[in-house]
Amino acid sequence: MWWSVTVLSFLLNGVCEAGITSSFIRVAAPSIEIPKEDFPPPHGYNAPEQVHITQGDYTGNGVIVSWVTPVEKYPNFVTYWKADEKNGIKRNRVRSKITTYRYYNYSSGYIHHATINRLQYNTKYAYELGHGNGTRQFWFMTPPEIGPDVPYTFGLIGDLMKIDTYIGDLGQTHASKQTLDHYLATKKGQTVLFLGDFSYADVHPFHDNEKWDTYGRFVEKSNAYEPWIYTAGNHELDLAPEIGEYVLFKPYKHRYRVPFRASGSTSPLWYSIKRASAHIIVLSSYSAFEQELTKVNRSETPWLIVMMHSPMYNSNNYHFMEGETMRVVFEPWFVKYKVDLVLSGHVHSYERSERVSNIQYNITSGLSTPVKDPSAPVYITVGDGGNIEGIADSFTEHQPDYSAFREASFGHALLEIKNQTHAFYSWHRNQDNVAVSGDSIWFYNRHFYPKEESSSKG
């Protein structure tokens, strides 16, 4: 069931001294942007570029392959085969749907989207795009079959990009390159959960859409080989009436495809998927909302994860309280259905909450303070991918009770689901060795093992 709602917000209280505010503070100056010349197109005539993949259906049997050809529409197909088959004898081919768009004085290349269906679980596939000296080959691994005890690793990065990993608020800076390289060096992630803010084209004059092209080339080394699950952020809105651009999300919707219809959604801005032992619900902070929670079968997918761009709980002065309208509506549902984790970006720093809720408010009692709640999710803000706008280093002076750990630094995170009851979570700052955790905790599943997490203070 899908809902479009508008709600009045109210203030969060409860700001006594609580969790850990890390003393590590990265330089707060904006990150230095990488020149366009550092992201050249691939060699070869009409060579496919900006190759990226995402889940192509509700259950993980499909993959959407997307790419851009700069000169000609054709060839408009992807060829794929099982990677362990000798010489790829049994090859299959799927044609793409082609789209283009104009944005102010920019004209896109030919944008291709091809959906490969009926793939086998837990299988490595090779795929090929292009023709002649422009031919390029890649590969991907399908997820294991859905089940309650299936282990799987998601990565988390904010405002940057995304391997069953979450990456958000990435941009195209030296800091974001460091974050992506750091994440890839772990060799653990299987899918990226990307929490929005892709290219940051809108911070440049006339929303320079060439930034979308260079961004696509930048993340290709991850996104062409492992699926990213996308959340749209505020920098994808691209509303610019001053230059005659009135269509919201125009570049984003043309360039990125998600399997929204498979989950009953009416818009690519909100949808859900099942992958391994997780049921993932993607919400949009800037559009109508999805009510998917009643459909979740915890015996099949015990881990219930919600993704959105703007955080509901945030103790940074940057974007403070912006998630209130969504919190007021969704938080009672999150508690009722025992959501395990809510992942967000938007705020350019790192923060992890306690399991708290603020649903007891009513006009008679006047109560409006977050309280400890074992049925509530942990809220994680990972907007620290390395964006051009720099670090959000202005936390509230007193750390609220709901905040367990916070730090003004760039980094990425990993969520390693072990079975239906246990998952290990770790956050890694860019300045440390890959193996070093700046924050870590064992999460216990809210449905099957709602035990209090004992290491909730960093």
Image (cartoon, rainbow, N blue to C red):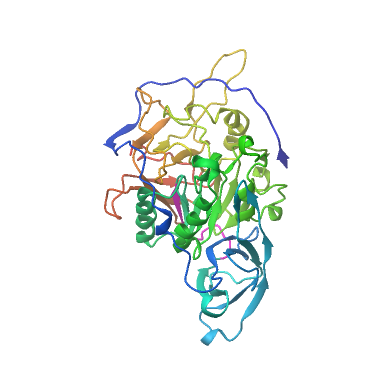
Residue 99: image location, x then y, percent: 67, 59
Tell which of 360 and 197 is nearer to you: 197
Is residue 151 shown in magenta? yes
Residue 178: image location, x then y, percent: 34, 53
Residue at 67 percent of width and 72 percent of height:
94
Q: Quadrant of the C terminus?
A: top left
Q: Is residue 237 visible?
A: yes
Q: Quadrant of the N terminus?
A: top right
Residue 149: image location, x then y, percent: 51, 59
Residue 213: image location, x then y, percent: 52, 56
Residue at 53 percent of width and 60 percent of height:
227
Quarter holding residue 28: top left
Quarter holding residue 353: top left
Tell which of 25 and 102 is nearer to you: 102
Q: Is residue 425 visible?
A: no
Instruction: Classify 270 as above or below 242.
Output: below
Number of labelled discs?
Answer: 0
Q: Which residues are magenta?
A: 145-157
Tell which of 123 and 269 is nearer to you: 269
Answer left or right for 364 relative to 318.
right
Is residue 69 shown in magenta? no
Residue at far front of view: 105
Tell which of 355 and 261 is nearer to you: 261
Answer left or right for 9 relative to 373.
right
